[in-house]
């Protein structure tokens, strides 16, 4: 990882562009030809003027030069078009590959990092930031290269004609360059402020859209919209202030750079009158000097993109360089599916959540995790699913440390359903089929029936072909949960984790789902976190977790006798059921 952290912006760009090297080489070569063709008309015009000054009147002598101007200008357009076609084709492939690398990287990162980073920031990096490398690779590489090479060739030719006039034609160059330098003063700080403000704007926009329901329900639209508009104004102000500081220097550079005739004409006239500069050479110097600066201005116009690319690549690289959940690639052989926690400690940042946890879950059993909110139940479940790595201690599945199990093999062994079930903007059938891409329609529907969601699916407008909406927004919370459970059942793994997966279902449907799940996972290891204790009373073992430690464990009856916390929780649960009109057991 240390080597990756030291990788420069250029090294990253070269790595991404390497598979498409031939496209970029072709683009640069064609761009050089294109710019060279755009210079040829200057030579042709110089020759025409020399002939005119000499008094030549035969049209046949001018016609070839006029044709040459037209032909080479046409070739310039053709070469430029083909060059940009090659560079854009290669660059769009690079952008696609970088986005694939970023999204694949997210699947290998600890959930803690992903949850701590606003989704708007990830969206900004994957979409806008990645897209912004297009200018550097598709334009800067071929066009800046070619626009620097050709003026260099003209300058060499001018030195051959007259070294004095060559130097005079370059007199505006250092002054214009100094103006560009002034424009870059404190560039990193100003652009960094612009990037920071736009990250905040993206995060605020995503938060505002995702929370629009809560905002409306609690009449917080004014405050929330004010937060969004403040972020938008700050982002706009950062861009305007940045442009204001650059504008004077930019305007000066654009005025001074092309003003080559300010020196060429008066001094050239002096040299011509004293006989040290021939008229044909003077005419060529005048015409060709006008062709030096436009390509250089085009080349320097990309300096802004070069200055930005460091920040852009830095943000992309920051994600790609994050430490993965380190796992081997070679599959392992399980001796069973026992789950063992051995002196496990874990924390989110500096906050300790689990403190020296030891527990064993036998294969083929139903184990329930209960306890007060924030005690660590969900953390235990997520550590079993390897969504995080433990801070210390170890977790073993089938006698093997989960850190020694390939992620793909572990994912094939554990199905995890959380209380926040995410459905994709796809059909209900395809959302369930994500548990097993090879499942037939009949198998999808069998899983739906077994998890108690077939009936409500059939009542939807298009049945199984109904689109769930973004994040499953077209369905209720309970419907989303049941579909997520069906998806997990279809996955058919030896270990199933239900992390308060029935939180949004009514008691009757929860009982139906629990009964269905208990049948579907026969012979498998089921770990359940439930907020209604009545649904886990038949568990083989109930583990009571409080403040990151295991307070007690046993069956429902045993804990009612031995664990004061469980007694209080059960009493509170029965009281809540009675007050809501449910019949107590």
Image (spheres, grey):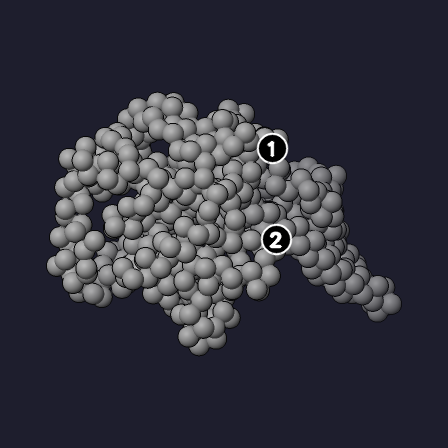
Q: CA distance from mark 1 to mark 2?
A: 35 Å
Helix, strand or loop status at disc 1:
loop
Where on the picture, by quarter, is residue 343? top left
Nearer the observer, 378 or 156: 378
Q: In the rendered view, would you say 132 is above or below 188?
A: below
Q: Count residues near mark 1 (Cα–Cα under 10 Å), then give few for <14, some for 14-19, many for 20+.
A: few
In the rendered structure, are the residues bearing label 1 and label 2 in contact, judged by CB atoms less than 8 Å apart? no
Q: Which mark is residue 331?
A: 1
**Apparent side of residue 316 relative to residue 31 in the rendered image (left or right):** left
Q: In the rendered view, would you say 162 is above or below 479?
A: above
Q: Earlier in the sequence, mark 1 or mark 2?
A: 2
Residue 512 in picture, x, y percent from top left: 35, 59
Residue 48 in picture, x, y percent from top left: 77, 60
Name which residue lies at 17% across and 43% down.
569
Q: Count residues near mark 2 (Cα–Cα under 10 Å), then give few for <14, some for 14-19, many for 20+.
A: some
Name which residue lies at 48% across and 49% down.
126
Nearer the observer, 295 or 281: 295
Circle nearer the viewer, 1 or 2: 1
Location of mark 2 (residue) = 92
**Apparent side of residue 274 relative to residue 444 in the rendered image (left or right):** right
């Amino acid at each position: 990882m240390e080597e990756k952290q030291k990788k420069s912006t250029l090294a990253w760009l070269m790595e991404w562009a390497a598979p498409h090297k031939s496209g970029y080489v072709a683009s640069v070569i064609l761009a050089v030809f294109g710019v060279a063709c755009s210079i040829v008309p200057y030579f042709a015009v110089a020759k025409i003027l020399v002939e005119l000054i000499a008094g030549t009147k035969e049209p046949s002598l001018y016609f070839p030069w006029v044709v040459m101007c037209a032909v080479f200008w046409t070739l310039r357009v053709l070469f430029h078009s083909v060059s940009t076609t090659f560079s854009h084709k290669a660059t769009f492939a690079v952008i696609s590959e970088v986005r694939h690398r970023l999204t694949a990287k997210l699947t290998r990162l600890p959930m803690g990092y992903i949850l701590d980073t606003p989704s708007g920031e990830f969206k900004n990096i994957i979409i806008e930031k990645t897209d912004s490398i297009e200018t550097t690779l598709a334009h800067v590489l071929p066009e800046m290269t070619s626009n620097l090479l050709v003026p260099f060739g003209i300058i060499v030719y001018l030195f051959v004609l007259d070294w004095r006039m060559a130097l005079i034609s370059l007199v505006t160059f250092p002054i214009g360059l100094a103006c560009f330098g002034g424009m870059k003063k404190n560039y990193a700080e100003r652009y960094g402020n612009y990037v920071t403000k736009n990250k905040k704007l993206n995060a605020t926009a995503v938060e505002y859209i995702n929370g629009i329901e809560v905002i409306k329900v609690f009449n917080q639209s004014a405050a929330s919209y004010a937060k969004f508009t403040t972020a938008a104004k700050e982002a706009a102000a950062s861009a305007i202030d940045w442009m204001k500081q650059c504008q004077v220097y930019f305007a000066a550079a654009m005025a001074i750079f092309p003003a080559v005739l300010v020196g060429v004409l008066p001094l050239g006239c002096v040299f011509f009158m004293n006989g040290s500069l021939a008229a044909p050479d003077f005419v060529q110097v005048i015409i060709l000097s006008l062709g030096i600066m436009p390509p250089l201005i085009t080349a320097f116009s990309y300096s802004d993109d070069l200055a930005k690319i460091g920040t852009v690549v830095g943000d992309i690289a920051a994600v790609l360089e994050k430490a993965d959940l380190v796992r081997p690639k070679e599959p392992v052989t399980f001796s069973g599916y026992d789950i063992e926690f051995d002196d496990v400690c874990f924390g989110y940042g500096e906050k300790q959540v689990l403190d020296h946890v030891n527990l064993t879950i036998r294969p083929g059993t139903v184990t329930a995790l209960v306890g007060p909110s924030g005690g660590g139940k969900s953390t235990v479940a997520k550590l079993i699913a390897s969504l995080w790595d433990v801070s210390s201690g170890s977790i073993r599945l089938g006698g093997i440390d989960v850190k020694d199990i390939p992620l793909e093999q572990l994912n094939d062994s554990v199905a995890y359903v959380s209380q926040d079930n995410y459905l994709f903007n796809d059909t209900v059938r395809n959302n369930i089929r994500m548990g097993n891409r090879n499942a037939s329609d009949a198998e999808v529907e069998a899983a739906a029936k077994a998890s108690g969601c077939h009936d409500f699916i059939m009542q939807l407008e298009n049945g199984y072909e109904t689109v769930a909406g973004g994040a499953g927004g077209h369905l209720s919370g309970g419907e989303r949960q049941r579909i997520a459970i069906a998806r997990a059942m279809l996955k058919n793994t030896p270990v199933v984790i239900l992390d308060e997966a029935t939180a949004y279902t009514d008691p009757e449907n929860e009982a139906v789902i629990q009964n269905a799940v208990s049948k579907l996972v026969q012979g498998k290891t089921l770990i359940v976190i439930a907020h209604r204790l009545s649904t886990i009373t038949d568990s083989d073992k109930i583990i009571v977790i409080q403040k990151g430690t295991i307070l007690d464990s046993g069956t429902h009856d045993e804990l009612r006798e031995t664990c004061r916390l469980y007694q209080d929780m059960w009493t509170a649960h029965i009281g809540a059921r009675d007050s809501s009109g449910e019949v107590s057991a």
